[in-house]
Amino acid sequence: MIKFDNLSKTNLMLLNGLVIGLSVLLCALLIPTRWPGMELINIAPNWLMMWVVAWSVKRSVWEGMVAGIALGAIQDGLSGSHLPSHVFSLVVVGVLTAVLQKQRYIQEEVVSIAIITFFMTGIAEAVTAIQYILQTRTSFADIASSPIWLRYQQVALASAILSSLWMPVLYYPLNRWWEKVESVED
Amino acid sequence: MNFSAKRWWGKNAGKLVGSAVAITGGAILWHTQAASIWEIYRTISLPFQPNAYSPAVVADSRAEQLELELAEAKAQNEKMKKLLEPNNDGSQTKPITVAKVIGRSADNWWQQIVIGKGSSDGVQVGSIALDGKGLVGRVAQVTPHTSQVLLATDPSSRIGALISRSRHMGYIQGNNDRSDRLVMQFFDKTPDVKVNDTVVTSNVSQLYPGGLVVGKIVQIDLAKVPAPEAIVKLTAPVNALEWLQIYPSPPTNLQAAPKPSTAPQSN
């Protein structure tokens, strides 16, 4: 076990940077992967969004926003299509998650992270759906009968269930690590 | 003043540098279409991919089936091609490569798959992906050793198609609610179509070569407005794909045989 107290502040920052980079890479690599339990009606957990939630929970709005921009750009690159963009959805998720914690609605960690993830997935997919609606110029009256709305319901629900169930796997190691880093920095 | 600025910098330097690094990194990956991540994914995942049968076996067994299915459509196509383009002998091009499916879509809204062959194997954006049984989709993005194939089932995919038996034309479009079923809309008000008819890509399609088997008609709704509609079930098992044959995209074929200036204009 590494003695954190012995590390200089610069080294700790570098190590933290490495953890951040590798965990984002891991999430990016998990996106195209479909292991058993990672798929419902061909829909998978939204790993990069889950990372943004884990990151923003105990951070400022600014930090949540930066994470949203960076990871949104990565997911845009991965999916090869730049409109609708994931930057918008992930920035909204990052900012909202950071704001939510400030108001201290939530105390119990175990359940609350899963619940936050569940609703953030719905919001993120809604931002994507809105971009589709604007793009295809669906009129307001036709939204309810449009294929986008139908797809939104499927994607949001399936992805929200999977993301919130897989969230602890991502959140606990990261949260423990960041708590440790913070305790050493203080 | 100077002191407080210094303190502010001391407190926030890490965050600012971190933000700059994060956004720059994101921008680079965005610009390069995350090619590095795909390459890493391929390297890691390749040893774990199912290797039940070799490309040679697939090519042999499925080629036979494909030939039977296409015999009729091919004969018709030859005739039509010769009528339309006297210089094009209509010879079938060989696949560039046989590629293993290594991953699924990077976004829940798009229906894509990732294959383990890329630009270094001759795959290009627009290359056509076939399973031994029928059309799967076309390549939307390539990195040196991976490519992303946009499935024909994606809502953004539109393919010019026709009924093999009656030559009635229309186009098929991805359908969100049922993954291996597509909607075919006909140009004719009263198309000659029956359940179990084979649907093939049309010769006038710009993105796909003509005569590729797409699927079979499973349901017909001739009363549909604005155009008669049918549901097409793909012959390729889009939810259980393992190996794909990648063919060059049609424009490269057509360049070899210059079109006569009197070629009919259509889309």
Image: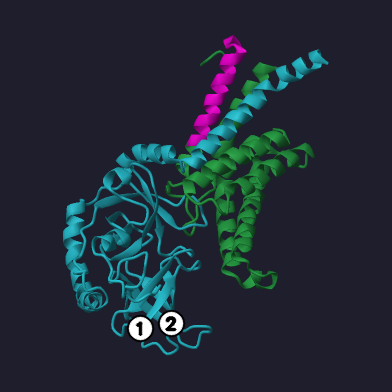
Q: Is residue A78 left or right of residue B72?
A: right
Please, which chain is the residue tagged with disc 2 on?
Answer: B
Q: Which residue is mark 2?
A: B187
Q: How far apart are labels 2 and 1 at the CA level? A: 8 Å
- Near mark 2 (Cα within 10 A), the count class, few <14, some 14-19 or many ≥20, is some
Are discs 2 and 1 less than 8 Å apart at CB? Answer: yes
Toward which corner of the image does residue A12 lie, by quadrant? top right
Q: Which chain: green?
A: A
What's the residue type where badge 2 is placed? Answer: Phe
**Given the current orientation, which residue lies at the most extreme top position?**
A6
Main secondary structure of the magenta stretch:
helix
Where residue B207 appears, as percent x and y from the top left, is: 37, 64
Above or below — where is B203 with respect to B41? below
Identify the mark nearer the N-term, 2 or 1.
1
Where is residue B71? Give x, y as percent.
19, 75
Residue wearing tag 1: B168
- The span shown in magenta is A5-25
